[in-house]
Structures are given as structure tokens and as C-alpha cells.
Image (cartoon, grey):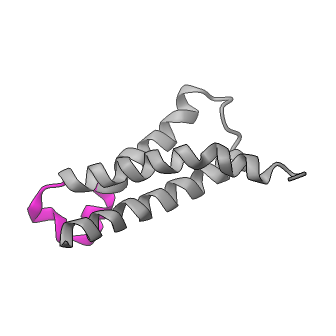
């Protein structure tokens, strides 16, 4: 691993787990009448991880450069984690 790509992926692994768990938790506590509205349910499930993604640069301006690889890796982790969290909610909810 000369380019450090494996190290970056290893660094963001715990972030992915946290985003999946936060999304799954938010989706599970979303009340029943709105669970069946896909857009509202998706927005409610992904609100907490997305807010954390937006809040980090606001609290620590030098933490992530929007043009840097860490920012884009975090964006990929956010999207993937939200997708996995919602999928986990659907799989567990229907079983």
C-alpha cells in the first residue's frame, strides 16, 4: 500500500459502523404513520448522520478540506451508511 488508500479505508471503517447504527436507530424510532411514506422515512432516518456531517466543518473549520480526499471519503461513508441503515431497518422491520 504505497498510496495510503488502505489506511484511509481502515480509518473510515468505524465511521461507517456509526452511521449505519445512527441511521438504523433513527429509522426504528420513526413513528408508524410516516414509516410508509418513503421520502419522509428516508429523510428522518438520514437526518442525524447528515447533520453530523454538516456540523463537523462548522465546529472545526480546518478538519476537512472540501477538495480533500478525507471529505469525499466521509461523504461516501455517509451515503453508504445511510443506505445500509435503511436497508437494515427494512429487513428487520419486515421479519
- Residue 48 as seen in the image, left or right of residue 28: right
The structure residue drawn at horizontal position 51% and vertical position 61%, both measured from the top left corner, is 80
Residue 93, picture quadrant: bottom left
Residue 23 vertical placement versus 93 (above, below): above
Residue 50 vertical placement versus 39 (above, below): above
Residue 9 in the magenta stretch? The answer is no
Q: Pinpoint residue 75: horizontal percent, then vertical percent.
A: 58, 53
The structure residue drawn at horizontal position 28% and vertical position 49%, both measured from the top left corner, is 25
Range shown magenta = 30-44
Viewer can see residue 74: yes
- Residue 68 as seen in the image, left or right of residue 22: right
Of 89 and 33, nearer the camera is 89
Residue 95, picture quadrant: bottom left
Q: Pinpoint residue 32: horizontal percent, then vertical percent.
A: 10, 61
Magenta residues: mostly which secondary structure? helix
Of 62 and 91, nearer the camera is 91
Viewer can see residue 68: no
The structure residue drawn at horizontal position 65% and vertical position 43%, both measured from the top left corner, is 11
Q: Residue furthest left?
A: 33
Q: Pinpoint residue 4: horizontal percent, then vertical percent.
A: 82, 48
- Residue 91 as seen in the image, left or right of residue 34: right
Amino acid at each position: 500500500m504505497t498510496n495510503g488508500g488502505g489506511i484511509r479505508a481502515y480509518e473510515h471503517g468505524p465511521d461507517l459502523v456509526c452511521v449505519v447504527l445512527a441511521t438504523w436507530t433513527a429509522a426504528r424510532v420513526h413513528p408508524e404513520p410516516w414509516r410508509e411514506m418513503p421520502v419522509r422515512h428516508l429523510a428522518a432516518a438520514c437526518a442525524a448522520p447528515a447533520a453530523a456531517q454538516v456540523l463537523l466543518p462548522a465546529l472545526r473549520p480546518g478538519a476537512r478540506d472540501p477538495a480533500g480526499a478525507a471529505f469525499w471519503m466521509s461523504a461516501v461513508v455517509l451515503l453508504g451508511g445511510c443506505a445500509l441503515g435503511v436497508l437494515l431497518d427494512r429487513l428487520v422491520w419486515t421479519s
